[in-house]
Image (cartoon, helix red, strand yellow):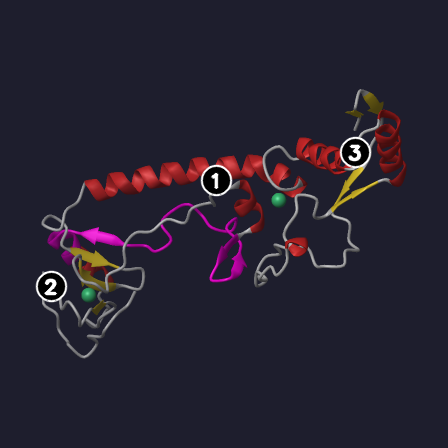
Amino acid sequence: MDVVLNDIPVRNLALTWDLIPTIHPRPGRRGEPVEHVESPADAESPADGWGVDVPGVLALVDAIERTGGDIGQLRETLLRSIALLVPHGCCPDCESALPSYEEALAAYEEAAARMAERQASVSPETHPFVVTRSSAIHLWKCPSAPREDLNHPGNTLAEWTHGKVVNGMRVPVRSYDWEPTNEVRRMTGEELADWIRSVRGPQGGLNYRRCNRCQPALPVAYTSTSSDAYLND
Ligand SMILES: [Zn+2]
Ligand SMILES: [Zn+2]
């Protein structure tokens, strides 16, 4: 890229990304514990992962010397040049992930709106039951009953690209989908009765479980209590 330092043009300054030989491992690899930063010198810098060509640096030094500038201008010029190359995130990987991040945000917003609509259309009175993905039946008010939940694509483009920090570990967010992660179906008594009939085994065996914590009174005869269990799903 071409830059101008104290009115002196410096042409073809070459910045390179993701150079392999660095003394410290690059921060932010997925699934790796995030190290505690001891000194400011070890802190993440916007220059991490970047390289620059020696002739380009010498041309910048020349420009500073010829104009009586100060050495800080070298740092400022290099960092400003990097910032121009990555206007949205922290690195070129972020820049190339921008379209997919924007798509994920839009998909998340839509899923969140659908979820809000679903939740607004039911109440504990009309839909007192909850059936989980593993066919457990709870009352809606049961503390063990799961709630519908959505994963967010990350508050920043960098989180989307590199993962977010959870309990000191960096975990990817790009693998999520934007539908509720836990299938939670709220049902009326009638819907639950239909559902129980549909999942009953051929000998009338039970293909569902009733939570022993909230012990929902089922709309059809519950033929056994042997499979009552404390459920956390
Ligand atoms: Zn990045
Ligand atoms: Zn329950």
Residue found 50% across the figure and 51% down from its top: 173
Q: Quadrant of residue 105?
A: top left
Relative depth, front residue between 28 and 229: 28
Q: Percent from the top left, x then y, of residue 155?
A: 47, 43
What type is the residue that disc 2 sits on?
Leu
What type is the residue that disc 3 sits on?
Asp
Disc number for residue 70: 3
Residue found 88% across the figure and 26% down from its top: 66
Residue 12 appears left or right of 48: right
Q: Which residue extends farthest top?
A: 7
Which span of residues is magenta-colored? 164-193
Q: Which residue is mark 1?
A: 104
Instruction: Examine the rendered structure and indicate whether residue 46 appears above or below residue 38.
Output: above
Q: Which residue is mark 2?
A: 218
**Which of pointers 1 and 3 indicates the residue nearer the eye?**
3
Q: Quadrant of ligand 2?
A: bottom left
**Which of pointers 3 and 2 indicates the residue nearer the eye?**
3
Q: Percent from the top left, x then y, of residue 209?
A: 22, 69
Lower sequence index among marks 2 and 1: 1
| Cα separation between marks 1 and 3 | 45 Å
| Cα separation between marks 3 and 2 | 80 Å
